[in-house]
Image (tube, coloured by chain):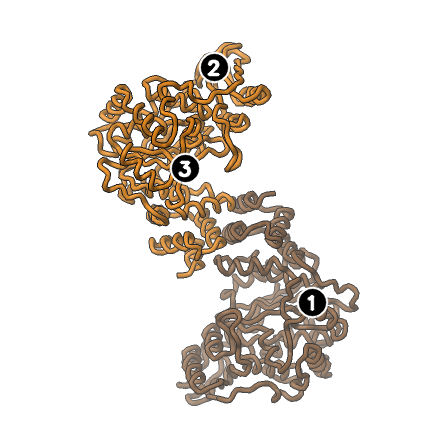
Chain colours: A orange, B brown
Amino acid sequence: MLAADVIRAKRDGGALTPGEIRWFVRGVTSGEVGEGEAAAFLMAVFLRGMDDGETAALTDAMMRSGAMLDLSDLPGPKADKHSTGGIGDKTSLVIAPAAAAAGAVVPMISGRGLGHTGGTLDKLEAIPGLRVELPLADLRRQLGTCGLFIAGQTPELCPADRTLYALRDRTSTVESIPLIVASILGKKLAEGLDALVLDVKTGSGAFMRTLPEARALARAMAGAARALGKRAAAVITGMDQPLGRAVGNALEVREAIDVLLGGGPADLGDLCRELGARLLLCAGLCPDLAGGRARHDEVIASGEAAAKFAAMIGVQGGDPRVVEEPSRLPSAPVRAVLEADRTGVLRAVDGVAVGRAAVALGAGRSRPGDRVDPAAGFVFMARLGDRVRAGDPLAEVHASEAARAEAALRALRAAISIGGSDRPPPPLIHEEI
Amino acid sequence: MLAADVIRAKRDGGALTPGEIRWFVRGVTSGEVGEGEAAAFLMAVFLRGMDDGETAALTDAMMRSGAMLDLSDLPGPKADKHSTGGIGDKTSLVIAPAAAAAGAVVPMISGRGLGHTGGTLDKLEAIPGLRVELPLADLRRQLGTCGLFIAGQTPELCPADRTLYALRDRTSTVESIPLIVASILGKKLAEGLDALVLDVKTGSGAFMRTLPEARALARAMAGAARALGKRAAAVITGMDQPLGRAVGNALEVREAIDVLLGGGPADLGDLCRELGARLLLCAGLCPDLAGGRARHDEVIASGEAAAKFAAMIGVQGGDPRVVEEPSRLPSAPVRAVLEADRTGVLRAVDGVAVGRAAVALGAGRSRPGDRVDPAAGFVFMARLGDRVRAGDPLAEVHASEAARAEAALRALRAAISIGGSDRPPPPLIHEEI
């Protein structure tokens, strides 16, 4: 086979065979297919698309490009959740331990924040001592003892994605549904899953801004996962404002712990329950969605979910006492409050602007490899649709120094708009695929 | 500027500015724009196209990517001819010396054969001692003394094309009109030309098989050349059978010398006259086309064209006596004659098949860098539309050994079809742009 022939077939709008796709991805991994060939292929896929069968074959080829976790000797269904990323999204920190407490094995490979979206690994690293860069063998062992891990990508899993993802970024071929699906699912399915819940965000703070875009991605992801024999649910959820009240690593861990202990903001708790229930249902751990919700609530009420989180923190080298004593998390020396400058209804929170303000504050990163300040961030006191009066507190800024807090206040003020008329708050869940 | 932004603009179907195009091509040359970015750009251009302004800007950027010949101190118009390549096309060997004899300065950078099409440099190298790989300074000097050169690409001229052409080959982005135009014209115009004649072949043996394809390429090339301030003519000529009677390096040199001396096959002589006349017209060396034809015929009849060819051979280290004594050219030890197997009209000669048979015979190459046998080739005795009787000789094979001659006879037989009914011979010139 010749790379140029595979590229030509896609260039001309043809459907590639699974054999051609497998061969090409293997070549990318081995280096036999060069960077130029890979980039031309990516652009041809971007502009010509891929049908469902090709997308599934590409996902399968990515998944098999390196080692795969074989978890067949562990009792219990293997399940995970993926989110396309948003602002203040700390659901993984709740759902993973809750599902593990309910009997699932949760091998959660996660990522770091970049640009306006945060990353689960950065949040976890706010816990003193906790390590997320762990060898695959250790992670494998941890699943046997603890039932879950949340850790960073290892070099063994899905190497083709590392090569292709870096190339997509440089060649403007990121926003292609088949390429997104294969990248996300290839990595997830290399974890050896039986079941997967997909949270596709839509709205001003999401990667997929509009509902039709989010729907297309959700359908393609659920379709590919099912085509590869996995039980999958995809939910399109709103990202028109930060999820919960906290944005920033330690602040978000604290909020996730609140939810694990039965408290926390309603929207965050509700979304965790809905996603968690679907995870349990796909994993076969409950007969229906209502049973899934009940089981999720049960492991939270009993303290088993929080205990599972503490156990995971301990195995990964962190201080498990943060669960009972959140004051052990890092906290920022400077606080400043953003007050409403007029009376009215909170009409819009520009998620991307909030995410950027968090980056400027040091809570996120603008370039891969930048260090983050675990303590920095925001806590919102008002949500979309709330009536506020001039002078009411809208958000609290947590910062390392006064100048950064001032800059963040200005950025937040620009991100929030207060209007005259009522407006119904956006739904939490838009659609289910 | 970021390569990813330029790629994205083209990916989304936008027109790039001359500044963006110049920046990108400069980056390709310097290595600042990587192979992946260049390949993604090529595929985006392939699938999204470029308008006339972009094509001219890309051509200009390619032309300026390296050194350019500055011939302004030489008297006389600087003119050249380019052909998209065909089988048996030795017109350059006639037109270049004829134009130089008529007063033009002809800095002809040419190429080697690959696949079924031959290359002018391979033909010239059949002349004992002649060198085509010469330093730019020597070529520059040769123009002053002799008025022409025909030589290979030098490293200084159009380096961006070398990088991009190799990448296009590997990434299936060859057959794109803006990319073809920029590659061909960028190299030609770096020669410091005032005038250019473009011979775009169409038919079974051509790169552009159909007339609409050839027309689109001819229009784009002439348009870009004129947009960059050059006088240009483009002619669409037939390549439904080999041009002239000879295919093979020494055999074609011999045939070109026949034409330079006033003889040779009519089709070849006619095409040389038509292209040569347009070259002289674009160069401003004659008032009209009729005057161009007359001037071309004049330098042939006077022997000045043949003398110019001999002079060029001498300066480039070859044996100029081949012009008067063609027996000094290499000749093959084995000859075999292909006879018509039935009576009828010669209806089709599959040019690609003839070209491949020539490669199999050693007269061409299947891979860059392969050595060629200068003496091997074919001489056709019949042309399309000729009535032949069973047993009539159709072609003579010149080979290094009997087995190769036999294989070539079989391949030629399969390439030629003899039918029952008359068919008018195809026109030599289809259209003029």
Callout in the foreground (3, 2): 3
Q: Are marks 2 and 1 in contact (CB under 8 Å)?
A: no
Looking at the rendered image, the quarter that the N terminus of chain B falls into is: top right
Q: Amino acid at mark 1?
A: Leu
According to the image, label 1 marks what residue? B136
Callout in the foreground (2, 1): 1
Viewer-nearest residue: A312 or A295:
A312
Same chain? Circles 3 and 2: yes
Q: Is residue A30 above or below residue B313?
A: above
Rendering quarter of residue B268: bottom right
Which element carries disc 3, helix, strand or loop?
loop
According to the image, label 2 marks what residue? A345
For the question of whether residue B16 can be seen, the reply is yes
Q: CA distance from mark 3 to mark 2?
A: 44 Å
Q: Residues within 10 Å of mark 1 (few under 14, many from 20)?
A: some
Looking at the rendered image, the quarter that the C terminus of chain B falls into is: bottom right
According to the image, label 3 marks what residue? A133
Q: Residue at x 53, y 71 (%)?
A: B369
Callout in the foreground (1, 3): 3
Q: Amino acid at mark 2?
A: Val
Q: Are marks 1 and 3 in contact (CB under 8 Å)?
A: no
